Image (cartoon, rainbow, N blue to C red):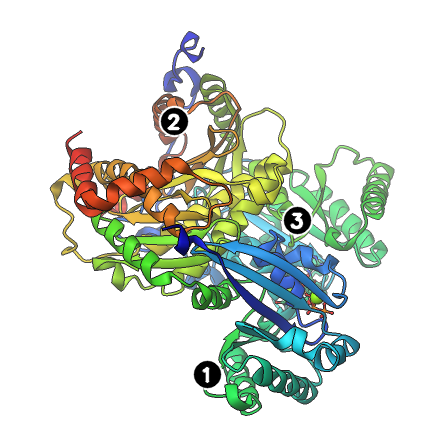
Amino acid sequence: MESTQPPLSASQHSPVTELPSVHEDPSQADHSRLKPGAQLTLMRYLQDLPDAEVPHTDPVPPRFHTGRLPNSKAGDGKPRLLLMGQRRSGKSSISSVVFHKLPPSETLYLETTTRIKKESMHSFMDFQVWDFPGHLDYFDPAFDVDNIFEEIGALIWVIDAQDEYLEAIMRLNTTILNLQHSYPNINVEVFVHKVDGLSEDYKGDTFRDIIQRVQDELSDHGYENAPVSFYQTSIYDHSIFEAFSKVIQKLIPQLPTLEALLNSLCSTCHIEKAYLFDIMSKIYIATDTSPTDIGSYEICSDYIDVVIDVSEIYGWPRGEQNGDDESLTETGNNDAESLITMERKGNNYLYLREINKYLALICLMGDDSPAEKKAVIDYNVGVFQAALKQVFPRAERDAVEAPAA
Amino acid sequence: MNTTKRQKQRKVLLMGKSGAGKSSMRSIVFSNYVAKDVRRLGATIDVEHSNIKFMGNLMLNLWDCGGQDGFVENYLTHQRAHVFSSVAVLIFVFDIESREFAADVISYSSIIRALGEHSPSAAVFVLIHKMDLVQTRLRQQLFEERAEYIRQASESFAPTVEFFATSIWDQSLYKAWTQIIYFLIPNARSIEGLLRELAEVVEARELILYERTTCLMVTHVTRDVEADNPFSDRFERISSILKTHKQSMAKHTGIPAGSANFAEMQIKTGRFMFFITRLTENTNLAAAIPPSEQIFNAARINITLARPRFAELDIASKPRPAVQQAFAHSADSGWEARERENAAAGFVG
Ligand SMILES: Nc1nc2c(ncn2[C@@H]2O[C@H](COP(=O)(O)OP(=O)(O)OP(=O)(O)O)[C@@H](O)[C@H]2O)c(=O)[nH]1
Ligand SMILES: Nc1nc2c(ncn2[C@@H]2O[C@H](COP(=O)(O)OP(=O)(O)OP(=O)(O)O)[C@@H](O)[C@H]2O)c(=O)[nH]1
Ligand SMILES: [Mg+2]
Ligand SMILES: [Mg+2]
């Protein structure tokens, strides 16, 4: 039945043919996060870079990933995500769990943040995460407010839903109103956090109450259209990753193109749901436009863990003398791929393909995808991959800089 | 050959003070609970028995003994002979967070004494548990101190008792249970021998045999370069990965975790290829092989062909005449030689 549709084609779905390439960042040229020859092994990337504390301020205007950065004057071109909120609301925990894979239970030992902690993330797009101390007055005149808020991609405001939140909301409202004045386009993302400890009813009530209080205040000041969104999050489940995915997606100008490509892939191959994941953070940067539910995200995200873990275990660099002759190297896959077949259903269930050094495509197969279809899927995923190269030339350039050994 | 098929019942006592985490680990290892589910467990009343069928003719007869003082008193007095006789293994769990460590050790001593009287040849494994609650840098030292102290109180078992630092939040639980199970499997040697033959035939770098429901490793064979694999904890890490994945699939598909089994999982990269597939009724086989489609395909075929041989060493819940036949046939023609032919055929085709 898939034969009625032509295979996915790059020219058809990708309006973006040539994008200006990202500015050269010399500090990055030599630290590819991958070991030689290992773009195939989905290695974990080092994330906390030594240069992260000193943001690079090359005066090159950002061009590539400027989704909504209208405030940008000059800077390093990396969108910033600011994490703000009350003390102990969970800001540092969120940053550690999402970007450093700290086990959630170990956040109990995190100490209070005393100065802004800036971290650079290098991935399909570069961005920075600034973790603020909770007790700071973010609009204190002693602060260089412009320096903080220019170039930001999003302000993430974390509210501890298990605690008294009225003061947190007051501060949030003040912050939004201040921002509306000078930086009206900054996305304000409110994380109603630590919902793991709450009963379903209480959780819903709290969430609605917080939204109400913020919106009332905004409309009192005539800002009902301010770009403020709300999420329920917890570091003890996938919700924090889902929320981050949505925050990041707003900063990706190519999102509509990616979604169109994924839609097309899904309908051609009868795929139930397809996600494009950032391997390192397990944030998904796009999915097809069929309805998402957290369950599909979870299984795909867990599956990445499986593949990464196994790849780490068996992808260690072996010596040259391991007896692999010519005929072996020729058949090895350059991009990792994985497939799970279920016993009950007797069909393909999950499919993963490494797209480039940052991204992996994960597909949840529908019930009508028999095993023979793998060839069709492989082919179409190849086409998808080619189209994506034009959307994200960045990853390709990096691959050239760090050629496989 | 049916005489060797008789199941070996092994009685395993799981003891330790109330709240130490005995039922938690049992539920995770044997009943497909995830770590965060165990908060729901209530205290165990008296003894909960479970029978767990395992690779290699092993039938685990697990006694999860409620640890509240009243129950322990009862085990040591009225039920002394009933509880402590014909024990193969005692697993004693200490809670690292306990504020009454000295008292815990005294209780341990009385249990050890009862065990010494009724099952002097039993093996004792001590798990120092909930290590996740200790900061990483303090773990090793604290573990060693406690272990030494407990060894002193182990009486006749002092020279042989084995210690493990465990937590339900990481693979350490699997490491401990893997060793305990290995100790219990009666025909581990023959399984290992067979696995080694198979590894040669399929040119695997490594073969790991996992029990299907628990995902505990039964045994493994490592060849050539893979012996230098820097991840020495990889067997229990894979256990833990598989278990987590099973939960995740169960949750997503709505199939109970007990039967949410994949038929096969494959991972191919430029450095290795890997797959896990069903081997026998109770086992899955994980194979790490060189990155070659040919070897990969041949290995899958050869593993399918080897199934009957392994099935003989496994427990069957229902009779399998076909398998018996295959075994009888291969017994005189020489399994290894035949498999080599098959492997060769695989390469040509
Ligand atoms: N139950 C629950 N606890 C959480 C969650 N996220 C964080 N916590 C806990 O909240 C406490 C405070 O976390 P931090 O991340 O240090 O808070 P912070 O906002 O960075 O605090 P300051 O640096 O003082 O501003 C820690 O004990 C975390 O374990 C969550 O999702 N659920
Ligand atoms: N932090 C941590 N908590 C654990 C661990 N294992 C178990 N627990 C907790 O310990 C508590 C008690 O666990 P149980 O397994 O019911 O204790 P038990 O030993 O069976 O107790 P009795 O049945 O009364 O003898 C549970 O709430 C678990 O959440 C662990 O490794 N780490
Ligand atoms: Mg902090
Ligand atoms: Mg119990």
Of the pair B280 and A238, the residue shown nearer to us: B280
Residue A326: give its label. Answer: none
Q: Residue at x 32, y 64 (%)?
A: B230
* Closer to the eye: label 2 or 1: 1
Amino acid residing under circle 1: Thr
Amino acid residing under circle 3: Ile
Q: Does residue A278 appear anywhere in the picture?
A: yes
Q: Are marks 2 and 1 on the same chain?
A: no
Q: Residue at x 20, y 37 (%)?
A: B342
Q: CA distance from mark 2 to mark 1?
A: 56 Å
Of the pair A11 and A315, the residue shown nearer to us: A315
Residue A381: give its label. Answer: 2
Residue A156: give its label. Answer: 3
Q: CA distance from mark 3 to mark 2?
A: 34 Å
Marks 3 & 2, CB-CB < 8 Å contact:
no
Residue B46 versus residue A155 in the image, above or below? below
| Residue A17 x, y percent position in the rendering | 37, 23
Q: Which residue is mark 1?
A: B160
Please give the chain letter of the residue carrying mark 1: B
| Residue B283 x, y percent position in the rendering | 44, 48
Q: Does residue A56 appear anywhere in the picture?
A: no
Instruction: Confirm if mark 1 falls within 8 A of ligand 2.
Output: no
Of the pair A69 and A361, the residue shown nearer to us: A361
